[in-house]
Amino acid sequence: MNKKKRLPNDCFALPRGITWTPVDHALEQLKRGLSTVKQSERIPLKHCVGRVLANSLYAIVNNPPFTNSAVDGYGFVGPARGSGNQLKLLPGVAAAGRPFNGTVSKGSAVKVLTGAVLPGGVDTIFLEEDVETKENSSISFTGPLKVGANTRNSGEDVKAGEKLFTAGHKFRPQDLALLVATGIAFVDVYSLLKVGVLSTGNELLDHGLEYPHLEKKGKVFDSNRPMLLSLIERWGFEAIDLGVICDEKNLLRERLDEASSRLDVIISSGGASSGDEDYVAKLIGSEGKLENWRIAIKPGRPLALGLWNGTPIFGLPGNPVAAFVCSLIFARPALWLLAGCGWIDPVRYNVVSSFNKKKKPGRREYLRARINHDGEAEIFPSEGSGRISSLSWSSGLLELLEHEESVCKGELVRYIPYSSFDL
Ligand code: AMP
Ligand code: MG
């Protein structure tokens, strides 16, 4: 049921000669190289929110299931004239869940409440507040009223057999209402993507330890792993903590072997460039399959993308800001593709810039930004990718495209709120 599919070794291969990969090119490679790795499983409806539909889903019953009243009022055989409508009132009432057993003939009416099955003969309802009743034996009202007024036809929303969702749809809470209404009790969804997260670096310390003398030993707290694990969970995948690994090839190999045998994706941070201690890129390069992408992006390069025993690995940069941005831009759509959801682009908005900025052409930049009280975008004063506080300060990213060389106050800029990344 939950068997893992392997990806081919050349799925990320870049054309020869490309050194600095444009962001869109890298995204295109991911889109083309990756495919759904999960099998499907059948789950009860109540567990489907956040899961990805594996087969197209069709309505079993009509919504509404029967023609019923949209208001509280009086049901009769329509239409009604503009004035002088007088009808005999039958005893009894048709209420939601309590149908009226008799038949209403022309010239008669019966009280009908919202949601009630239309009594036999009734095709039109007059609103209760516009009707005058006389001694509970007759009603009079002023029309005109068309046949079918104030009723809801069986299947007018959805007909049995109609397609509700196509494979790849990620269920939201409001979808449950539709599924329930159309008679669905179980859905086939892709099994949860299992994503392992590890940090690499001799300098890293697990959080939650007693406050140590960081500077004496040159240690920093491992900020990336809790952040990345939480991102994975937030996106609805199964997050597996693979711990911290020091810069040591054998330990890293062991951890990757173990993780790749049971997980669908591995995300690591740190050690992804070509320095002496950058074992992630080195190891995947020598013993796995590495596409070490020098992506023209700030913050973010390098992103070591590879396969270890057929399991995709995202080797993110160690700097927390770069790790975060690369996760949103590259890992998120890739993970959703692997999970069966297809490719998802974040929604971007044009907003007015409140600042001036010069930029190097040729690379894409993501600036940590937020919307100020005037509704304009402002950016964090420093662009340092170790400035972790900027992530909490900001409410989204500004995307400056490769060809852009400056931003002037008052110009429109592309803003991607974190909510566009489901955060
Ligand atoms: P690296 O990509 O391994 O060269 O690391 C770049 C910078 O990011 C270095 O200053 C590291 O100490 C820092 N760094 C790497 N991993 C983490 C992490 N998990 N948490 C916080 N900082 C990190
Ligand atoms: Mg390192």
Image (cartoon, grey):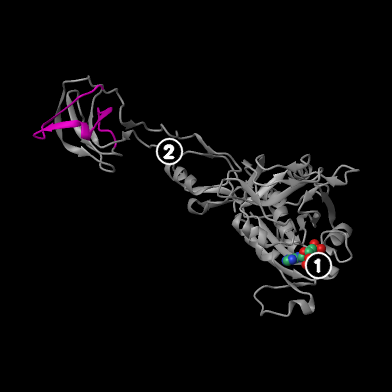
Q: Secondary structure at mark 1?
A: helix
Question: Badge 2 local density, few (<14 within 10 Å), some, or many (20+)?
Answer: many
Q: Which residues are magenta?
A: 117-144
Depicted 307 relative to depicted 22: above or below: below
Residue type, numbered disc 2? Val
Look at the numbered disc 2 and say if its residue's Cβ is closer than 8 Å to ligand 1.
no
Residue 149: image quadrant is: top left
Instruction: Tell me residue 45's x, y (percent).
Output: 49, 50
Q: Is residue 55 above or below residue 263?
A: above
Q: Nearer the viewer, residue 6 or 133?
A: 133
Look at the image and say whether residue 228 sits in the magenta stretch. no
Q: Quadrant of the N terminus?
A: bottom right
Q: Residue furthest right?
A: 17
Q: Give me the residue at 67% from left, 78% from top.
A: 209
Circle number at residue 61:
2
Q: Residues within 10 Å of mark 1 (few under 14, many from 20)?
A: many
